[in-house]
């Protein structure tokens, strides 16, 4: 008998998706320029291949992967390289980037290229196409996808789990990917199953996306073991470990990976991008981004060239409203506020949420009252209250060695429920950063 399709703990923030959930995906016009940071994926930044003055076509590789955990970067528009240097990055700092002045007279048609006939390719050849297309996880982490497609030989993968939860409030990119491009999702699943040699796929979709569930169900293939499983809405169900628990009732051990329980998890938008690389021959140069919130005039789900500046994207949605106060990349639970709207959309940018003054008003912080709500909310059974005390005392190493800081997903559930408004997950993020600085070679 199937388990109850759930994981323990977690929270139920308002999903706030009504602004965009029913809006079909539209393509935004090409901006005047795109800015492509060399670091927009997990791992090493890509190595530059172009110089100022070069004319490049849409889809051309402008930077190559540097090492195993890295990804190439491709031009998202035809034009001329105007500048290579430091540029505002969504992470808050400045990073090396290539600025391309987009050719206003170009039809933006990529060079003719051979389409890889995926059915005739071996798993290794399929993985090579995905690697060369620069596909990374589009759910936010931007981990190079090809690495997930080549698990160690001693691992036995039984199930591909397709992550269609999109549990972050406001975001509807995965929702629209499934509702608008269901065949593409299924082609991507088929290709992934071939790469991994896995016989079964489960697609987990939260029940607040009935049209996506219907579209994906209607297009399910007859010749593969692919099943759609609607899930009760709960945050953070889209986290890999939570989704595996909900769908398969398996627990990934502390410090372990989904592979340890025979599972590979892939986000639904990344899967659709894999299919696109074979359908069009194009690398990852554009993605669906949700632009939403009460602070933007015309919320939308747009297909956006990677490298589009946030200000251009917001202006394509009618601009900011008078109420706008803060621009957040990603959702309000795990996203980060950006201070410079010249920062560009990256491969991993899921959404741009513009919040109002009412939504971001400062909340007074009080001492911990030991209510235990944070323990009841933590989906990985940590003790956020204890961790919070240690973080405030600067005892970061102790947090890691004795209280499993590494298992913290920075999901924000503990901060969300804390009646004393203690910014617990932010404290844990800062502790992690402090430990990283200490560990970095001088
Ligand atoms: S941020 Fe970390 S400690 Fe807090 S609920 Fe999430 S996993 Fe638990
Ligand atoms: S929820 Fe906040 S107040 Fe309650 S125990 Fe946790 S840290 Fe303390």
Image (cartoon, helix red, strand yellow):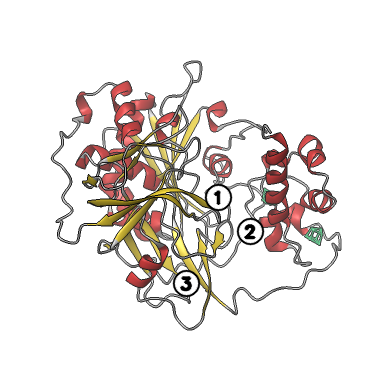
- Residue at image point 82% right, 39% down: 398
Disc 1 vs disc 2: Cβ atoms closer than 8 Å?
no
- Looking at this view, is 152 or 318 the one in front? 318
Residue 68: assigned label: none
In the image, is 383 to the left or to the right of 52?
Answer: right
Q: Secondary structure at mark 2?
A: loop
Q: Which quadrant does ligand 2 occupy? A: bottom right
Q: Position of residue 186 (x, y in %)?
A: 30, 42
Dot 3 falls on a residue whose secondary structure is loop
Q: Residue furthest front?
A: 53
Q: Is residue 127 above or below residue 189?
A: above
- Image quadrant in which you'd find residue 292: bottom left
- Mark 1 surroundings: few (<14), some (14-19) or many (≥20) residues within 10 A: many
The residue indicated by pointer 1 is: 237
Check disc 1 and report its element: helix, strand or loop.
Answer: loop
Q: Which badge, 1 or 2, is on the more N-terminal residue? A: 2
Of 167 and 216, nearer the camera is 167
Please name the residue that numbered disc 2 is placed on. Answer: 11
- Residue 206: x %, y % from top left: 47, 54
Which numbered disc flags the more N-terminal residue, 1 or 3?
A: 1
Asked if ligand 1 lies within 8 A of label 2, the reply is no
Image position, residue 75 (x, y; %): 29, 46
- From the viewer's side, name the closer residue of 259 and 251: 259
Instruction: Measure the C-alpha gap from mark 2 to mark 3.
Output: 21 Å
On the image, the x and y values in percent for residue 394 come to 82, 48
């Amino acid at each position: 008998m199937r388990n109850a399709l759930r994981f323990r703990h977690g929270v139920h923030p308002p999903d706030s998706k009504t602004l965009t959930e029913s809006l079909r995906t539209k393509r935004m016009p090409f901006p005047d320029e795109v800015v492509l940071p060399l670091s927009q994926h997990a791992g090493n930044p890509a190595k530059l291949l172009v110089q100022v003055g070069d004319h490049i076509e849409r889809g051309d590789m402008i930077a190559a992967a540097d090492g195993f955990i890295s990804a190439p970067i491709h031009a998202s528009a035809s034009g001329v390289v105007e500048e290579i240097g430091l540029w505002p990055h969504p992470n808050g700092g400045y990073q090396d980037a290539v600025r391309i002045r987009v050719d206003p007279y170009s039809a933006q048609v990529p060079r003719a290229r051979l389409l890889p006939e995926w059915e005739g390719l071996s798993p290794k050849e399929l993985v090579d196409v995905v690697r060369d297309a620069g596909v990374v996880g589009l759910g936010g982490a931007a981990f190079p996808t090809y690495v997930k497609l080549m698990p160690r030989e001693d691992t036995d993968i039984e199930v591909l789990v397709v992550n269609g939860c999109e549990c972050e409030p406001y975001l509807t990119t995965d929702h629209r990917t499934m509702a608008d491009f269901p065949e593409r999702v299924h082609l991507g699943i088929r290709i992934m199953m071939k790469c991994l040699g896995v016989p079964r796929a489960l697609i987990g979709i939260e029940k607040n996306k009935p049209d996506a569930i219907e579209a994906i169900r209607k297009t399910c293939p007859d010749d593969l073991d692919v099943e759609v499983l609607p899930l009760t809405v709960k945050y953070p169900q889209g986290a890999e470990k939570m989704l595996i628990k909900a769908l398969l009732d398996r627990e990934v051990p502390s410090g372990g990976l989904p592979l340890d329980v025979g599972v590979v998890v892939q986000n639904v938008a990344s899967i659709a991008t894999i299919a696109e690389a074979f359908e069009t021959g194009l690398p990852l140069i554009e993605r669906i981004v949700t632009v939403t919130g009460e602070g933007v005039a015309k919320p939308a789900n747009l297909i956006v060239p990677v490298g589009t500046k946030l200000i251009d994207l917001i202006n394509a949605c009618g601009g900011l409203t008078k109420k706008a106060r803060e621009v957040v990349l990603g959702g309000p639970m795990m996203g980060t506020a950006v201070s410079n709207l010249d920062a560009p959309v990256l491969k991993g940018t899921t959404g741009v949420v513009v919040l109002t003054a009412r939504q971001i008003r400062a909340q007074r912080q009080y001492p911990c009252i030991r209510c235990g709500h944070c323990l009841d909310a933590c989906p990985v059974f940590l003790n956020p209250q204890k961790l919070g005390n240690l973080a405030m005392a600067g005892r970061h190493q102790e947090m890691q060695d004795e209280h499993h800081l590494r298992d913290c997903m920075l999901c924000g559930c503990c901060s969300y429920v804390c009646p004393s408004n203690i910014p617990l997950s932010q404290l844990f993020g800062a502790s992690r950063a402090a430990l990283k600085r200490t560990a970095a070679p001088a």
